[in-house]
Structures are given as C-alpha cells and as structure tokens.
Amino acid sequence: MNHERGEPESVPIDPEAERRELEAAGWERIEERSGKVVWRHPTSGALYPQGAATARLRMDLASEDEPGEELRGRA
C-alpha cells in the first residue's frame, strides 16, 4: 500500500501471461485493421480489449467456483 496516499500499490501486468490465460480458456485473439488487438468471448462472441477480457475471464471463473452455484434455479 502506498502509505503516503493510502492507495494500494500497483500490481505489474504480464501481457504474455494474460494472453496464454485467455487462449487456454478458449478466447479468440483478433487483430483489427488498425493493429489493435481484441479478444472474442468463447460463448457470447462479445469483443473485449485484453485487460477487460482477462478481468471478465477471472470473474467468470470465480462465479463458477461459488458454493451453491449448482443449486441455483432449482426449486
């Protein structure tokens, strides 16, 4: 934590590790004509920049691990 301002310290981002994580989860890397790279979600087809795609993937994985998830929707 940055004790001077009360802010959390930044965490270094490893773009190559994120790329491998996304590819392993079935995300498709797309390079646009402009050279910008986006990622296609494997089930919805939505496009995300890499940081947002990684955050979405991790959020999806965390929600799968929630206890009781398999019981939702059952009455």
Image: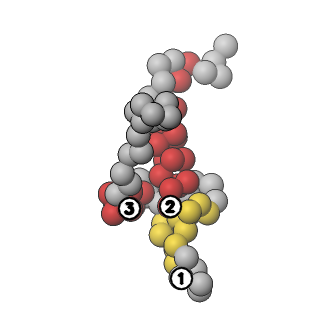
Give the answer, above or below, for where 35 lies relative to 10.
Answer: below
The residue identified by callout 3 is 15
Identify the mark nearer the N-term, 1 or 3: 3
Of residue 38 and residue 6, the one placed in the foreground of this image is 6
Label of residue 50 in the image = 2
Q: Nearer the viewer, residue 73 or 67?
A: 67
Q: Amino acid at mark 2?
A: Gln
Q: Position of residue 10 (x, y in %)?
A: 42, 45
Residue 63 appears anywhere in the view: yes
- Indicate the position of residue 57 as horizontal and vertical percent values: 49, 47
Q: CA distance from mark 3 to mark 2?
A: 8 Å
Mark 3: amino acid: Pro
Disc 3 and disc 2 in contact, CB within 8 angstroms: yes
Question: Regarding mark 3 in the picture, which secondary structure is present there?
Answer: helix
Neighbourhood count class around disc 2 (C-alpha, 10 Å): few under 14, some 14–19, many 20 upward = some
Task: Write the residue at 50% across / 61% down.
Answer: 50
Disc 2 to disc 1, C-alpha distance: 13 Å
Considering only vertical position in the picture, is 9 above or below 20?
A: above
Q: What residue did someone put label 1 on?
A: 35
